[in-house]
Amino acid sequence: MPTVVMPTVVVDAMGGDHGPAETVDGAVRAWREHGVPVLLVGREPLLRDRLNRLGAARDVGVVHAPDAVPMAEPGARAAASASSSLVMGCDLVRQGAGGAFVSAGSTGAVVACAVRGIGRAEGVLRPALAVALPSLGGGASVLVDAGATADPTPEMVGQFALLGAAYARVVLGVADPVAGLLSIGSEPGKGNRLARRAAEILPGLPVRFHGNIEGHDVLAGTVDVIATDGFTGNVVLKNVEGTVRAALAMVADSGIASPAQLAGVAARYDPRTHGGAALLGLKGTAVVAHGSATAATIARACVVAHDLARADVAARITSQVAAPLATEPVP
């Protein structure tokens, strides 16, 4: 039988609000509990010390990167920091030292460094973050963009729908995904200039376009793909997570159901469950974890990144995206 190749996941060990205190622990858990090979990138003395404390010095590799990108660092400046764990981690994936990249760093910085280091796939205007949100009936809807590009063009939003539809087919197994455009009204012509123009473009693209959808459709399973700009998408994602937590807490406080009974619902919307958002439209695999990621979240993000890389999802999604929607690529 042919040897099964287990892609190594490169982890930005300095990223996130908690840095190595959680990323190293999460990487070790990914290896010990799921058999995912992991390579940490960051300040070696700190990482080695943490690995030694966990008894994992021989299990997880380390590449020294002297600098760390602050969470508030703008994307352009982050990409210029050649000796940072973020930039060096993306470069390692491009060089073939790893099959996927994980970071809990600033979303803008991760996206900028991934585009520079891993590279944007041919024909893709701008990468987009995709998150599968659980919906009524047990399915899921792909929210895209969930925070990579705050101010996209209408053409980019159209391509986000294509990337999301490809993700739904390849990862979720939806044979013929339906995409909707998030707006302030379901009627044609509703929305700001971006939404109205995107709504004109989407019917001409190779995707089943439902039309406009509203906020109450996000978790209803109305469509398989929710296309929007990264600013709106990120607000929606965090609003969903916060609203679910608040609603379940209210139900538990009322005595209708105990926290234990509600745990299953809570877990479906917990960042620790989905690990992070897949950055679609790259030449390789990258997963962006929540900035406040714990070890459990990092471990799950490593598993997700490993599975995406092993299934060659990045290439399969890119092959399904239509021809470029602009004559000039967007930097």
Image (cartoon, rainbow, N blue to C red):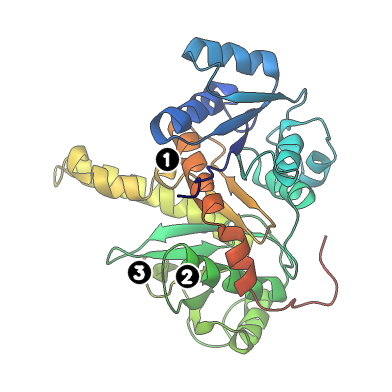
Left or right of residue 306: residue 195: right
Q: Tell me the element at label 1.
A: helix
- Report if residue 225 is visible in the image: yes
Q: Residue furthest left?
A: 256
Can you identify the residue that label 2 sits on? 169
The foreground one among 331 and 258 is 331
At label 3, counting other C-alpha atoms closer than 10 Å, the crowd grade (few under 14, some 14-19, many 20 or more) is: some
Crowding at mark 1 (Cα within 10 Å: few <14, some 14-19, many 20+) = many
- In the foreground, 25 or 272: 25
Q: Is residue 178 above or below residue 75?
A: below
Q: Residue 160, which numbered label?
A: none
Q: Earlier in the sequence, mark 2 or mark 3?
A: 2
Indicate left or right for 259 with 194 as reference: left
Q: Residue at x 21, y 39 (%)?
A: 259
Identity of the amino acid at label 3? Answer: Ala
Amino acid carrying mark 1 in the image: Arg
* Mark drawn on residue 220: 3
Q: Nearer the viewer, residue 74 or 21?
A: 21
SS of the residue under disc 2: helix
Residue 250 pos. (x, y %): 26, 45
Left/right placement of residue 48 relative to residue 301 reads right
What's the distance in space between the residues labelled 1 and 3, CA to CA? 22 Å
Determine the residue positioned at 47% across, 35% down: 299
Q: Which image quarter: residue 166?
A: bottom right
Q: Earlier in the sequence, mark 1 or mark 3?
A: 3
Occupied quadrant, residue 134: bottom left
Q: Secondary structure at mark 3?
A: loop
How far from the left and from the top, in percent, is residue 111? 70, 50
Residue 272 got which mark?
1
Instruction: Give the Cα distance between marks 2 and 1.
Output: 24 Å
